[in-house]
Image (cartoon, rainbow, N blue to C red):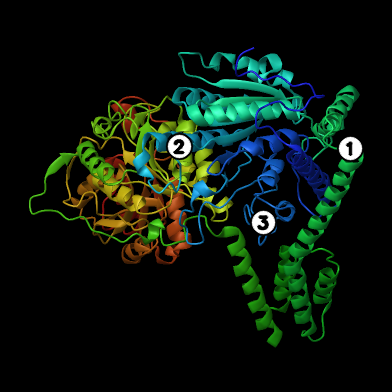
Amino acid sequence: MSEEKSTSAKTSSRPSTKGGPDKSTILRDFRICCISREVSILARREVLTGKAKFGITGDGKEVPQVVMAHFFQKGDFRSGYYRDQTLMLALELCTIEDLFAQLYADPLHDPFSGGRQMNSHFATPLLNEHGEWLTHTDRRNVSSDISSTAGQMARALGLAHASKKYRELPDVDPEEQFSKQGQEVVFCTIGDASTSEGVFWETINAAGVTQVPLAVSVWDDGYGISVPKRYQTTKESISTILEGFRAGEDSNGWDIYTARGWDYAALWEMYAKGIEKTRRTHRPALFHVDEITQPQGHSTSGSHERYKSKERLQWEKEKDGIRQLEHWIIASEWATQEELEQIRREARKEVRAARDRAWSTYNQPSKQAVTELKALYEKIPDLHPEVEQLRKQLQRLAHPFISEVVKNARQLSFQLAGQDLPVGEELKAWIESQQQKNHRFYSDHLYDQTETSALRVPVVPAVYSDQPELKNGYEILNQFFKEIFARDTRLLAFGEDVGQIGDVNQGFAGLQKRFGKERVFDTGIREWTIVGQAIGLAMRGFRPIAEIQYLDYLVYGLQPLMDDLATLRWRSNGRQMAPAIIRTRGHRLEGVWHTGSPLGMILNALRGMYVLVPRDMTRAAGMYNTLLQSNDPALLIECLNGYRLKEEVPENLSEFTVPLGVPEVLEDGTDLTLVTYGSSVRVAREGIRLLENKGISVELIDVQTLLPFDLEHRILSSLQKTNRILFLDEDVPGGATAYMLQQVLEVQGGYRYLDSPAKTLTARAHRSPYGSDGDYYSKPNAEDVFETVYNMIREADPRRLPAL
C-alpha cells in the first residue's frame, strides 16, 4: 500500500493515529453532526411549508467534514460548495441561527451574503467596514461560494497559489497579514458528479504543474442529482482515473488518498497525514471520500425515491455516517447508547429553538411594515371597493415578505392618485423610504463604495516635455510595467507567453529577468484557471495582472469572470474583494479568431467589473495607474493593431491617471457627434478627414471606458450642440453600440435633442474573415464613416449636399 493511500480502519478499534481524538473531541464531533443533520431536516420542512424558497443541505456529509475541521488552521482558506454546513459549524464560523437566516433570505441577519444567496453559500469577512483588509492569518477564511458546479476549483487554485507566492516572496508580507511563510492550505470541496466539469480537470492539471497547497475533498455519494456515477465517471471512481496524476519520487503531481465517508477513524488518519504533508511540501492532495449517503436526496426540489432503488435506499440507511459513528463510539466504549441519545435530543431541541428565533427575527421588519401600512389605511376616508380589497389583502398576509407589503402599498398609491388626500403624501414618503432601504439591501456593493473605489482615484494629468520622446506602443507599456513593478512588490503578471518572451507583443519583454520568475511567469493554455489564479491571488493581498492572450479567447475564462470575479463584492455583501486586473488585446487584426470585439457580450456579462477600452498604449498605462490605486476588478482591452504605432511618452508615465467614466473629446465639431472607442478611434479620424473636405464638422468622442460609461454626461453636452449622433465600433449589430445608444438617449435623456434619428455603425454580423479584403468588407472603415455621416447630414438638409 502506498504512503498516500488510506483505507477504512476497523470500526471496532479506537483511532491509533498519534495525536488522535480524545473522548471529549469525539463526543463534540458527534454532537455537531447531530446538530447539522437536524438543520438539514428542518430546512427541508421550512421550504415544503412555504417559509423558505429553496433548500440545499449537507446531510450525509457530516462525518468527513467534522473530521476535516480539526486540520483547518488559522490562515487557511476554504473554496467549497453548498454542502459544507457541518464544516462551518465545526469551525465555529457560524451559528445555527445564521444558517436559518440565510435560508429565509434575511438581508439583516444572513452573515454570509446579506440575503442575496440561497442557503449553504458561505463566506467570512476578509474586509472591515471601511473596505480595508483584515488580518487573514488570525482567522479561518471562507471565500464566498458560487452555485456554478465546479466553479470553486479555479478560485481554489488561485488561493493556493498565493501561499506558494508568499513562500517564494517572503518580503512581500513582512507583517504576516496574509500569510505565515506560505503555510496556509486551501481546502476545496466538490461533489463527485461535478468532477466531470472541464474546470476540475484544468485545475487538477494546473495544480499538479505549479505544486500548490491545495487539498481537494471529493464528496462521493454516487449520484449527480438523479444520474448515477456510472454515467458520470470512467471506472466509477475519480481517484482511480486520477492515478496518472499521482506524484512520483522524482516528478510533480498529486498525492491521492481515499477513505469511506462513514469511517471516522480512517478519515482522521487520512486528513492528519495528508494535510500535514500538503502544508509542509505544497504538493496538492486529493481526498476521495466514498460511500457517502444523501438521506434527503439532492435538494427540496424532489425526492430521491424517484431514482434510487429500494436496495440503495436501504444501504444508505445502514451506512448513514452518523449512525455508523454512533456504532463506533459505543463499540469503542467512548459513550453509551443512552448518552448518545441524550446528545441527539439536545441537538434537536437546540436547533428547533434556533430556527424559531431566526424566523421571529426575520419577520420583525415585515410585521412592523404591516402595522405602519395598516395605520395609513385608517387615515383614508370612505374606502372605495378597490381600496377596501387591497386592505383585505394586506390583512390576509400571514407571514408577509417585505415585497408583498410594499406591493400592496404601491397599488394603494395608484388608487389614490389624483385625490387630494393628506395621507397620499404620507403614503408616498413611506413607499420611498421602503424602496431606498430595500434597494440598498440588494443592490449595494456591486462596485467598491469605499474610499478605495476606482472612481475616487485623484486625476493626475499626463505631463509632456516640449519635445516628447516618440516610442512604439509596446515600448511605452514595457517602460510602464518596469516602473510599476519596481515600485510595488505585490504586483504579479502571468499568462500564456508572458514570462520568458515577455508576452506576444513584448509589453513584458525582459521583465522576468529583471524581477524574477516568481513575479512574471508563464502559464499553460488554460484561460479558466488563469482567471481563477487572478481571483485567488487578489483575494489574498496580491495585485495580479492576468493576461488572456487575445480577446477572442476570453470566452474560455468568461464563467469565472462572470460568476465569480464580477459578483464577489456584491454576493458577499461587501465583505470580500478581488482587485484583479485582466489584461487582453483585441479589436482589429487578421483572422476569424484574432479580430474579435465582442463587447456586447462582455458588457452584459461583467457588471461588477470595469471594462476599459483605451485607444492607445499611453491611455492604457494611465488606466492601469488608476486601477492599481483602487480595489475594483477590471478588464482592460489593449488595441491589438496599435503596439507598433508611435506615441508621445509622458514624463510621468507611471503616475498619471485616466479617470474612469470620463470620455475625452478628441475633435470639436458642430454638425454631428461621433462616439467610439479603441481601434475605431483611428477609423473615425480617417473618416473625419474625408468629411472635412465636404465642409462637414464632426465632434469626435472617445468614451475610454464602457463600464462605467460617461458619468459626467459629456456626450449629452455634445449632442445638445450638434443634435445628431452616430455610435461606431467593431462589435456586431446590436452589440456595444446599442448599449451606448441606450445610455445616451435613455439614461442621459439625449432623445430630447435629436434633430435626426440616432444611428449605429458596426461590423457585420459574422466573424471577420482572414485577409485585408475580408477585414475591409466586414468591419467599419473610413469610407463607411464618411457615407454614414454624409447621408445623415444630407437627410436633414438635402440642399446642403448633393446625393452620393
2 vs 1, front mark = 1
Above or below, 654 relative to 323: below
Per the rendering, the mark at residue 182 is 2
| Residue at disc 2, secondary structure | loop
State the residue at coordinates (75%, 81%).
Answer: 376
Q: Can you give x and y, in whole percent of width and height, for residue 564 in the image?
A: 54, 42
Residue beneath disc 3: 110
Q: Hey, what amino acid is under mark 2?
A: Gly
Residue 530 quadrant: top left
**Which residue is more in the foreground, 238 or 16?**
16
Q: Can you give x and y, in whole percent of width and height, for residue 418 in the image?
A: 68, 81
| Residue at disc 3, secondary structure | loop
Q: Quick one: quadrant of the N terminus?
A: top right
- Among the two numbered marks 2 and 3 on one chain, the one whose residue lies closer to the N terminus: 3
Q: Hey, what amino acid is under mark 1?
A: Thr
| Residue at disc 1, secondary structure | loop
Q: Hey, what amino acid is under mark 3?
A: Asp
Badge 1 density bin: few <14, some 14–19, many ≥20, Cα 10 Å: some
**Which residue is more in the foreground, 630 or 604?**
630
Q: Can you give x and y, in whole percent of width and height, for residue 193 in the image?
A: 68, 27
